[in-house]
Image (cartoon, coloured by chain):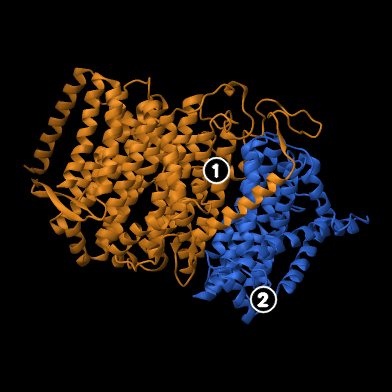
Chain colours: A orange, B blue
Amino acid sequence: MSLEILLIIAFGGALLTYLVGKVSYKGRNFLAVAVSLALVAFVACLYGKAGEETFYYGFLGLNLALRLNMLSWFFAITIATVGALSIIFSLSYIRGREKTDFYFLIMLLVNAAMLGIVLAGDLVSFYIFWEIMSWSAFLLISYNKGPALAAGMKYIIMSIIGSVCFLVGMLSLYASFDTLNISQIASAITSASSGYILFILTVFGITFGIKNAVMPFHTWLPDAHSEAPAPFSAVLSGILIKMGTYGFLLLLYVIVGLKLFLNLGSGLLSFHSMLCFLGAVTIIIPTFIAMLQTDAKRLLAWSTIGQAGYIILGIAFGTNLALAGGIFHFFNHSLFKALLFLAIGAVEFRTQTRDLDSLGGLAKKMPVVFICTIVGIFALIGVPLTSGFVSKWLIYKTLILEGSPFLAFFALAGTWGTILYCYKLIHNVFLGQLPEKYKDIQKSPLSMQLPMVVLSLAILLFGILPGIPLKVINSIGTSFGFESLNVTLWGISSETGTLNTINIFSAVLVAGIIVWMLFRLGAKSVSVAQDDSYAAGAHAPVDKYHYTAEFYNPLHRMIKPFLRDIVDEFYYWIASCIQRLAGIIRHIYSGDVGYYVMYIILFLALLIFFQLKWKPW
Amino acid sequence: MVTKVIQIILSPVLALVVGVFFLGLARKIMARIHWRYGPPLIQPVIDMIKLFYQKSVSHGSMFDLGLILSLAGSIVVVLFLPFGKMCPLSDSGGLLVILYIMLLAPLGIALSGGQGANPNISIGISRKLILSLGYEVPLLLVLLAVMTRYKTISIMEVVSAQQSTGWSLISFPLFLSGISYFLILPAILGIRPFDVSSSPQEISSGPMVEYGGKYLALATIEHAFVLFISIALFVNLFLGGAANPVIFFVKMLVVFVLDLCINAVFPRFRIEQAIKYLWKWPTLLAFLGLIISLAIRS
């Protein structure tokens, strides 16, 4: 019962916000925040509860059900939190723009639909919520008009392909098992042949792969993420693509089940190792492409694809540590990528640009945003004491110990690439020289700073005490049939290697304090202006210098030829072929009635000819 | 407990002494190879004390904090590295944690330098990060080969396994990885032919250019730690570690002097040449080492 109320609040709140917005914009803002925060509180109260309930009987002879367990709860709380924070961020970001009521309606609708997805207990309701999410996301991606329209179109076309695959899979499941309830399918599928399971895995894998931007289905993401409004980019990257992750978890571990999944096929040709390989490729290539970007949001978008690779790798590898790492990384990625998109949004809000080649030196102008971005990129890199480290550590460790060092190599090398693009991001936006035109720039408004600070604190908290989320993740793992992990508050202990974040934390803290004291002991330093710098007798340029632009130029020259997005070009080729074909077909409709009469007569003549010749009727 | 606390205090101090000694030794040996007399061995210490009392300039809080972060990170790495039998934090995460905390040093310097707003710094950091991407590829393959071969991610276990089976450097197939590590060691240390990021004549020591006074002193200490860490990692992984600190120190000294000889005679690579070199021979050797380790394991 409570799940229905949750969804009613979510959807009803979205509509109500829209209606209130017609009357007063203050009331609308208040209501939007209130609804999203109420959802967070509601979901938080559901912790530890489990159950399934039917909320609609007899939809085409099927019962629609909602279902709550640890997995859906963990996703739901992430969705609600990131959603609420982006709504708060939107308050000042979206002020003064067109159609703000519509914006808030769709933001809340996307959140509601995602909650619906993770709470759905059967595939029909899953599909309904999935479509609501896809279409409302399309509306928001195109919100900015201009290039955003094309980006939205690309997204929705790929999304529809995914939905069609989902429909095919769903119908086939219904034909085979006569039910679409997830738990009933899960118990019925054990008797299916392995060929059929492979078919199911492939069709649903395409759906979820497109949403999760697994290579080669990633091409919609860079455009969509960079063109959407910043708070929605945070939602897109933080949680919307994670619906693909949820789908994969549901597919691999709930529907098909651990044993069936791992035993499908053999050796390198099994579905399991193919998916791991795809994950590894998805880590490495986008990471290198991200280094070459000059648009801050596009850089983060490519980084999202790369990080999604870690999640897929963790989930597909199929050990308890890897699964814990994968799910934990999903959670971390939601936090830090939302944080980074919001930070870039805050910068864009003040400077009206996100071009890495023209920004710079904003650290002193926007200190809070800067510090939050530092926390965000540290988590993205996986520096110890941020939560990103723990999840990556789990994945690496299991990859190494289970004898897959090459997968581990891809994952680790991806991390080094991550350092390069992260540093480029922070250097080109916040460090280096402050251009003259940004001299009088103001701090970000409080409603922008607040969500970023909350996210940063969460990242640090779960980095130092990873046991809090790991406990939940561990119970998800055990519900999938994995062996339980030995989780402590500050890490994981086992015979093959222990992680103790509290030791690392105290060591870094003490070392930092000692160095800081040493630093204080020395003669006092004088603060100088940025142009007061040493250039070995040469003239140091006062304004933006060349080397910040094209930051990795030597590397750029070397790797650029290898990093063409062939997949995207291929899709565009298909699209242009279809367009040409359609162009040819279009000529039939000339608009001249005489032609149409001729078509009709020709068609009738053809029918008569058939009848005379073969007598089929 | 008490021994642990003593170890925690002692190991960074020892590392610092060894690192600073290496700095002095480097100048002396380089001078002799160049047919000069060279400064006294304790010259770096004298310089540092002098620098602490000198005036310096700061470009902002990140300029200070980045340097502190970098040095703190290096000190923490030392706590995870066995020095002889001494390894205070060996049970807190193993080699993977070392690999990750080692990031803090270059990242801190990069963040600090970034706020310096000097073209030389930006060029230097860009080169440093590209170079580290370059050597990290073979380095990761090397470390993965070691971890695969000994089936552990704990560096203590790698060391103790070598006590019974002999050095990794002379065992099959890890000698391939060992050679690869030695080939990339100059790049990790940032000495010639890989001193692209600090090249003094070209970009005025790159990231260091805005440092003066105590900043320069701390950066020198940081450099000493980096010397210690990179060489100690090699000794631990490939030269069997050591039963006591003295033998460990001797092993480190041999490796360092060999690297100094390379440093003394080679000219500097351009950054593209450096990457091409690093991604060719060392990577190939490390790759072979990993493949064979993996094949033997199963």
Q: Position of residue B132 (x, y in %)?
A: 64, 51
Q: Position of residue A469 (x, y in %)?
A: 37, 55
Classify residue A342 by image quadrant.
top left
Tell me, for residue B167, which label it has, or none: 2
Tell me, for residue A142, which label it has, or none: none
Above or below: residue A338 compared with residue B235: above
At 14% from the left and 51% from the top, the residue drawn is A53
Residue under label 1: A422
Q: 10 Å neighbourhood of mark 1: few (<14), some, or many (≥20)?
A: many
The residue closer to the viewer here, A218 or B230, is: B230
The residue closer to the viewer here, A204 or A116, is: A116
Above or below: residue A263 compared with residue A51: below
Q: Position of residue B250 (x, y in %)?
A: 77, 71
> Is any part of residue B131 visible from this angle?
no
At 43% from the left and 31% from the top, the residue drawn is A448
> Is any part of residue B198 visible from this angle?
yes
At 66% from the left and 57% from the top, the residue drawn is B280
Q: Chain of mark 1?
A: A
| Disc 1 element | helix
The residue closer to the viewer here, A332 or A256, is: A332
Q: Name the residue furthest left.
A: A617
Using the numbered discs, state the Cα–Cα distance from disc 1 to disc 2 in whole angstroms: 38 Å
| Disc 2 element | loop
At 85% from the left and 54% from the top, the residue drawn is B43
Which quarter of the image is occupied by the C terminus of chain A?
top left
Circles 1 and 2 on the same subunit: no
Query: Is A390 on the left-hand or right-hand side of B117?
Result: left
Q: Chain of mark 2?
A: B
